[in-house]
Amino acid sequence: MTSSSDSSKELFERAVKGERRSLGRLLTSIERGGNEAEIIAGLAHQVSGNTHVVGITGAPGSGKSTLTGRLLKLFSEAGEKLAVLAVDPSSPLTGGAILGDRIRMDDLAGEESFIRSMATRGHSGGLALAVPAAIQLFDAAGYEPVIIETVGVGQVEVDVAGAADTTVVVVTPGMGDAVQANKAGLLEVADIFVVNKSDRPGANDARRDLELMLDLGHVSGLEQITGYRPPIIMANSLDGTGAEEVLGAIKSHAEYLHNSGTIHNRQKERLVKEIQNRIELLIGLTADGVLKSELGNRHITQVLDRKISPAEAAKSIVRLLLKD
Amino acid sequence: MTSSSDSSKELFERAVKGERRSLGRLLTSIERGGNEAEIIAGLAHQVSGNTHVVGITGAPGSGKSTLTGRLLKLFSEAGEKLAVLAVDPSSPLTGGAILGDRIRMDDLAGEESFIRSMATRGHSGGLALAVPAAIQLFDAAGYEPVIIETVGVGQVEVDVAGAADTTVVVVTPGMGDAVQANKAGLLEVADIFVVNKSDRPGANDARRDLELMLDLGHVSGLEQITGYRPPIIMANSLDGTGAEEVLGAIKSHAEYLHNSGTIHNRQKERLVKEIQNRIELLIGLTADGVLKSELGNRHITQVLDRKISPAEAAKSIVRLLLKD
């Protein structure tokens, strides 16, 4: 254990100095979770808090990966050393092979930038802890911006996207995509909208739907308070239309966050959310232990016998766990 | 409060007697969450435990909704009174309009069967509590089977699908769909595989990929213990090919569960998972309270000042919350 955390410390020091292989190995530990991941996150946290985090989210097939690729290119051309973390397991950015992943990603990454996919195989608390830790690590290693690509379907995925400083929501024309984004809770976390595949029929309808929802206040309420209204950008990732405009909107939003001081709130919210997730994980482990104990078994039997409800069992166990 | 829970009790009694409007209103309360939802779940739990729960899951565009529609038709023709709960916000089964939802769903539902979508707008614990409560309510009201359609992207969604008695995973040819399903953790919860759109190129490759993954043991380990191997069914939901076979496989799997006694484990696992989710929610609420208190603020400030890590803050707060 000690030698292993020493090694994480050494790897961390090398990663901060720019060694990509060490960074890659640390990300693998973070992905795996557990004690080592916590140590790495702790080291990174100490020297983090400087990068700008951009979330890019949208349903599978919305072309968000291609857009992310375009942004990667534009940022790189502008001399930025950026990191891309693809949380979407189906992201073409990181290929499809089970074993070939790491290799192909490294091929894709430019001289300065770092592309990485993250899969946590659905284990509890996985993404919710691994993504902030990876952000802190990229931050500590001097990557800016850090782009997080998520599939935007699912509660955890929306939470992850919403934890960015600037969240870009990608929708496509047709099939009520904007409406679906609204249902999934994506509108509330959006700082920038992109209507992708804007050459398709219905693109203007999608734009109008979004405008209408913004008018109706289907947003976080930020607009009313601050005057910031999420722009809606028409794009076509395949030929690159709109990508420059998205880049500009990200920069404008970052400027707005800094000028208004809102950036501190976002960073604070992200850390509070992380503490919260870690508390839930710790308590979840304790609760699992109790459920597997004799006491837990008695409760489960009573629920199976329909003598008490699952909610009553939960309350009784929580009373036994928590201090008054 | 008292009058409101009396009313839930009355609605529940009417729903159990077959009144669809009451059932719909109870489902709305469950979707909203909170105290009323808990009361309804408690009432339903007392008389539940009889229905068979079928999870149907797959990425958006995999055609799982059309397959669900086909199964709905086949089950209905066989005289079953079944319920369908679509957790996927983009399910065409339940339409796309924000306001028109309920109306269109009721139009779609047959004489005996009940179709319903569920959207929880990403609030914490939402789906994880609402789906089991809805299952118990359908169970109490005599619906069998209860089909849960989820999008299968995202941790909570995979958990929800995996909590079924029989889980059907739908993949499509091309783009390494099977590989993506594996990454998302879907293979481990699958009892039946459906390769949909089997007229497309690559359908046989998809089948072979799945066979290979099953051979390699990318499954729950159930096969080694029990000899049950998930069948792989080639289907085309558009023209109905394979739907009868899927129905047969669901029935065979249900028989297998009952003959082997495994059904009791699944039902128990589902209840234990529900207790666990409720414990986490309750303690999460307490933890939120602490985070918002003076004590929580001190911890957050120390994290913001980089004096302690989020993990250290979480541990310290948990120590203060939990009994020794």
Image (spheres, coloured by chain):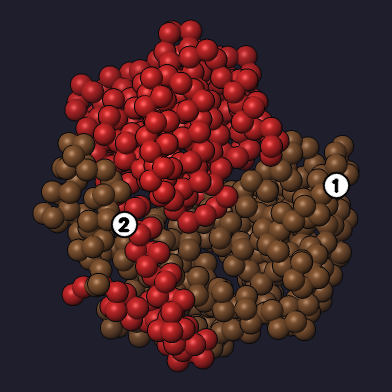
Chain colours: A brown, B red
Q: Can you identify the residue that label 2 sits on? A: B279
Residue B57 drawn at (x, y percent):
49, 35
> Is B288 positioned to the left or the right of A203 in the image?
left
Mark 1 falls on what kind of element?
helix
Residue A129 drawn at (x, y percent):
46, 67
> Is B80 positioned to the left or the right of B153 in the image?
left
| In front of the other: B19 or B233 | B19
Asked if one can make out residue A79 in the rendered structure from this viewpoint, the answer is no
Q: Residue at x 79, y 69 (%)?
A: A228
Q: Chain of mark 2?
A: B
Mark 2 surroundings: few (<14), some (14-19) or many (≥20) residues within 10 A: many
- What label does residue A208 carry, if any? 1
Mark 2 falls on what kind of element?
helix
Q: Residue at x 13, y 48 (%)?
A: A298
Residue lying at the far left of the rendered structure: A294
Asked if labels 2 and 1 touch by Cβ distance under 8 angstroms, the answer is: no
Q: Residue at x 22, y 56 (%)?
A: A316
Q: Amino acid at mark 2?
A: Ile
> Is A230 positioned to the left or the right of B248 in the image?
right
Q: Does residue B61 sit above or below A178 in this rendering?
A: above
Residue B90 drawn at (x, y percent):
63, 38
Q: Does residue B314 sit above or below A60 in this rendering?
A: below
Q: Residue at x 50, y 33 (%)?
A: B25
Residue A12 drawn at (x, y percent):
47, 83
Q: Does residue A105 sit above or below B277 in this rendering?
A: below
Q: Chain of mark 1?
A: A
Tell me the quadrant of the picture where the N terminus of chain A can be found: bottom left
Q: Amino acid at mark 1?
A: Arg
Asked if one can make out residue A5 in the rendered structure from this viewpoint, the answer is yes
Tell me the quadrant of the picture where the C terminus of chain A can be found: bottom left
Mark 1 surroundings: few (<14), some (14-19) or many (≥20) residues within 10 A: some
> Is A282 positioned to the left or the right of B66 in the image?
left
